[in-house]
Structure formats: structure tokens, C-alpha cells
């Protein structure tokens, strides 16, 4: 292992500078994909990367690639990175740590005049969160062939704005075909976004894979009617249908166990008047489990529950699957490189499967991939209170550095 160490204070300063772009009064960050703020932070990253001697290219879905040359330019780059877009009530670190740790890794190699055999490529993936444009991990999905380019460009946000138009508007509709080049490997540093590492006082998570994720949009159709004159047994109340379904879905996840989770995060009720029994409702489902067969069981169960509820209330409930990402196992050599780096760094570590989705889950389909986790306070994320320590950010970045060097120096 090289005895290189990153500059933790410089990394922390860079993270805090970046957090000002879209910073919220509660200390979080609201910098949703393809907003002006996303454009601003992208330009800041490019300026930093070019100042660090990188050559920058942008692909057709706005993914940013900042390449640091290696001794042998014919070798495919070892890639590092994550995402700069955030949830509406996001934190300072989700995704951002991985991108800025990659920048710090490059700055550290420059300070040491250290030349790797293979190039190093820092990547910012567009629209990882999926908060504005569903599904999540959209642009890394185009790069890895999971989604077609036109499918991505035609995605629209709740105001009907097209992904492709917004990409052009902020100036990041690149020429480079998405997925145009091979990567030797991909490593992503990320906060755990859950409570396990902190609870076990471990600094490093050696991430072995990502659980399966399914998103659905569902509609409930009943009948608008007068809240005062319609007897309870004459109603076709769409909100009651949604509410009973929500309780049933929660029970299905708890009964499945084994890490099963299910969330209804967006709800709309029409017509939205105090004295009208709602005739229409719509909502989203995010359902996850480490085992795809368990997700199949949960889907069968919630469809049966919806049929029963529809019968009871004389309403209709229909589902669209808007995203289905299978459970992913990362590359054993890359996992071993992360584990060896954690060990060499003297950090407490444990293997862990990611509960959150990440671009690395897409990259694993086309190149050897692994992730490094660091703890976040209380396991809180997708919340403005998200926080990590400067020491853990440095530890995670040093582990990332050593894992990357062990691959980038292979001849
Ligand atoms: O949804 C996820 O798991 C990721 O944080 N976008
Ligand atoms: Mn993330
Ligand atoms: Mn996230």
C-alpha cells in the first residue's frame, strides 16, 4: 500500500463550499437535478477538476467525466464518483461526498506528483436521486445501457418539464455518446444513510451489493360525492381506498421481514375540497428487499390487498411499475481491494449490503464495481440534518484512494 494520505481539511472545506450552492436555512441542500443550482455546482466541479489538470467531457445525458492521465493512455480509466444532485430536503453529503472525495483523491496524487499506470476518471452522474425526474439513477442507467437515451430525455417532472430540455437549458446537453468508453473499474464512496455502522462503531462499510428496488405509481378511482348527504355505505371514497391500501402495504413489508421496506412518499387526492368525498387519488410506492423473490411475494400480496379493498369500497385501484432495479452483487476483487484498504488503514470495518440505491448498482452491470461506506449520524439521510464527521470523510477517502491505486497500478 502506498503511504499517501489525503488532505482531510481541504476535502472538508470543499464539501462546505459546495453545500452553499442550494444551501437551506436548516443546514441542508436543495439542489435538484437540472435546476440552475445543479448547473452552478457542475460548473464549479469542472473548474476545480480542470485546475487539477483533468480533461473534462460531458455526455448526452449530462454525465461529467474528468480524466487524470495515467502512464499508459491506452488503458481504460479507473473511475470514481457519485452524484451532486440532491433531494428537495437533502443533506450536504449524500452523493456529494463521493464526487468531492474523488476530486480530493486527484488533488492528493497531484501534490505527490504520483503517476498511476491507468488514467483515473472522476464522474458526476446526472439525476441519481430521481426526486425530480423518475426513475432514480437515470443517467448512469443510460451510460450502462439499462435505459435508452430517448427514454431519459423524454422523462418529465411534475410541472411537465422534459429532462432533455432542462439539460439544454442549463448547458449540459453534451455531444459525447453516453456509454462511449470502457471503464477498468468503478469505486463509489457514499454515506451509509442507515444506522448500522454507527451502531457498531465501525468507520468503514465494505459494500458487497445493493438491494432490489421497485417503484410503482398507483391510481385509485372512486366517485366525487357530497360529504353531507352521502351515507357511509353509499360512498366510493378514493382516499379511504388509498389509506386502507397504505396500512395493508406497511403490514406486508413488516410480515415479509428480512430487510423488507415499503414507502408511500407522494400522495395526491382530488378534488381536494373539505366537503367532497374524494373521487380520485394517486400515490407512489418505493419497495425494497435484498432478495428479488421477496419483492415478487410482496407485489403479489399488495395486488391481492388492493383487489380486496377495491371490492369493499366499490372503487378501482390500478398500478404502473415505474422502476425495477434487481438486487446487485459487486465484484469480489473490488470488494477485496476495499477491505484490504480498510484493514491497512487500521479502520474498523464490516461488510454491508446497501439499503439505498446508487449509480454503482448500474455500473456493476458493465465493469468491476464496489463501494465504500462511512457512517452518518443516527443513520439519518434524505433529511437536512444529515451529518458525518470530518474524520470519517477523510477515512473513507483514504480507503477509496488505496483501493483505486491497487487497481490503477496493475500492469
Ligand atoms: O433512492 C435511493 O436509494 C437513492 O438515495 N437515490
Ligand atoms: Mn446518493
Ligand atoms: Mn439519495
Image (cartoon, rainbow, N blue to C red):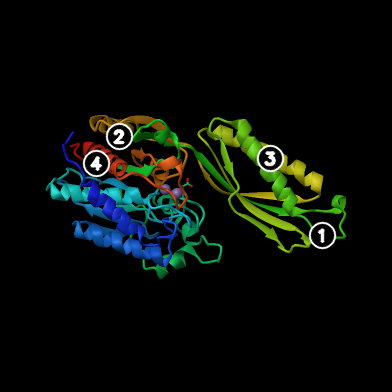
Q: Which residue is mark 3?
A: 248
Residue in view at x 21 percent, y 56 percent: 54
Q: Mark 1 or mark 4, which is nearer the start of the sequence?
A: 1
Q: Which residue is mark 1?
A: 227
Q: Is residue 156 above or below residue 331?
A: below
Q: Mark 1 or mark 3, which is nearer the start of the sequence?
A: 1
Q: Is residue 307 left or right of residue 349?
A: right
User: Mark 3 near mark 1, Cβ–Cβ under 8 Å?
Assistant: no
Q: Mark 4 or mark 2, which is nearer the start of the sequence?
A: 2
Q: Give how far apart the Cα atoms at labels 4 and 1 are.
A: 63 Å
Residue in view at x 76 percent, y 44 percent: 309
Position in image of residue 244 (x %, y %) = 72, 45
User: Mark 4 near mark 3, Cβ–Cβ under 8 Å?
Assistant: no
Tag 2, which secondary structure?
helix
Q: Give how far apart the Cα atoms at labels 2 and 4 are.
A: 9 Å
Quadrant in the picture for the N terminus = top left
**The quadrant where residue 335 appears:** top left
Residue in view at x 20 percent, y 36 percent: 410
Mark 3 burial class by Cα count in 10 Å: few <14, some 14-19, many 20+: some
Position in image of residue 100 (x %, y %) = 30, 51
Mark 2 burial class by Cα count in 10 Å: few <14, some 14-19, many 20+: many
Label disc, if present, on residue 303 of the rendered structure: none
Q: Which residue is mark 4?
A: 401
Q: Which residue is mark 2?
A: 338
Q: Mark 3 or mark 4, which is nearer the start of the sequence?
A: 3
Tag 1, which secondary structure?
loop
User: Mark 2 near mark 1, Cβ–Cβ under 8 Å?
Assistant: no
Residue in view at x 43 percent, y 34 percent: 196
Amino acid at each position: 500500500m502506498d503511504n499517501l494520505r489525503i488532505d482531510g481539511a481541504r476535502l472538508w472545506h470543499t464539501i462546505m463550499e459546495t453545500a452553499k450552492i442550494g444551501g437551506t436555512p436548516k443546514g441542508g441542500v436543495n439542489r435538484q437535478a437540472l435546476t440552475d443550482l445543479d448547473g452552478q455546482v457542475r460548473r464549479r466541479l469542472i473548474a476545480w477538476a480542470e485546475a487539477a489538470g483533468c480533461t473534462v467531457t460531458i455526455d448526452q445525458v449530462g454525465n461529467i467525466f474528468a480524466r487524470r492521465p495515467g502512464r499508459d493512455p491506452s488503458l481504460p480509466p479507473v473511475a470514481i464518483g457519485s452524484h451532486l444532485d440532491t433531494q428537495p430536503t437533502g443533506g450536504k453529503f449524500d452523493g456529494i461526498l463521493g464526487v468531492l472525495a474523488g476530486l480530493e483523491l486527484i488533488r492528493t496524487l497531484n501534490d505527490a506528483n504520483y503517476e498511476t499506470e491507468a488514467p483515473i476518471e472522476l464522474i458526476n452522474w446526472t439525476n441519481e436521486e430521481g426526486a425530480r425526474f423518475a426513475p432514480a439513477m437515470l443517467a448512469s442507467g443510460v451510460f450502462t445501457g439499462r435505459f435508452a437515451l430517448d427514454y431519459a430525455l423524454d422523462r418529465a417532472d411534475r410541472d411537465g418539464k422534459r429532462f432533455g430540455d432542462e439539460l439544454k437549458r442549463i448547458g449540459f446537453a453534451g455531444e459525447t455518446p453516453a456509454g462511449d468508453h470502457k471503464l477498468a473499474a468503478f469505486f463509489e464512496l457514499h454515506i451509509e444513510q442507515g444506522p448500522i455502522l454507527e451502531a457498531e462503531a465501525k468507520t468503514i462499510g465494505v459494500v458487497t451489493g445493493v438491494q432490489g428496488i421497485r417503484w410503482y405509481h398507483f391510481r385509485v378511482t372512486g366517485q366525487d360525492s357530497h360529504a353531507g348527504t352521502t351515507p357511509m355505505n353509499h360512498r366510493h371514497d378514493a382516499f379511504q381506498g388509498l389509506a386502507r391500501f397504505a396500512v395493508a402495504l406497511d403490514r406486508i413489508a413488516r410480515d415479509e421481514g428480512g430487510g423488507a421496506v415499503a414507502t408511500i412518499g407522494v400522495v395526491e387526492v382530488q378534488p381536494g375540497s373539505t366537503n367532497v368525498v374524494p373521487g380520485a387519488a394517486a400515490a407512489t410506492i418505493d419497495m425494497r428487499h435484498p432478495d428479488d423473490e421477496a419483492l415478487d411475494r410482496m407485489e403479489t400480496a399488495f395486488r391481492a390487498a388492493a383487489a380486496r379493498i377495491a371490492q369493499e369500497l366499490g372503487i378501482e385501484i390500478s398500478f404502473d411499475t415505474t422502476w425495477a432495479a434487481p438486487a446487485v452483487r459487486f465484484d469480489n476483487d473490488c470488494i477485496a481491494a476495499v477491505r484490504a484498504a480498510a484493514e491497512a488503514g487500521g479502520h474498523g470495518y464490516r461488510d454491508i449490503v446497501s439499503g439505498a440505491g446508487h449509480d454503482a448498482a448500474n455500473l456493476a452491470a458493465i465493469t468491476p464495481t464496489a463501494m465504500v461506506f462511512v457512517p452518518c449520524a443516527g443513520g439519518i439521510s434524505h433529511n437536512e440534518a444529515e451529518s458525518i464527521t470530518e474524520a470519517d470523510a477523510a477515512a473513507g477517502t483514504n480507503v477509496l484512494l488505496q483501493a483505486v491505486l491497487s487497481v490503477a497500478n496493475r500492469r
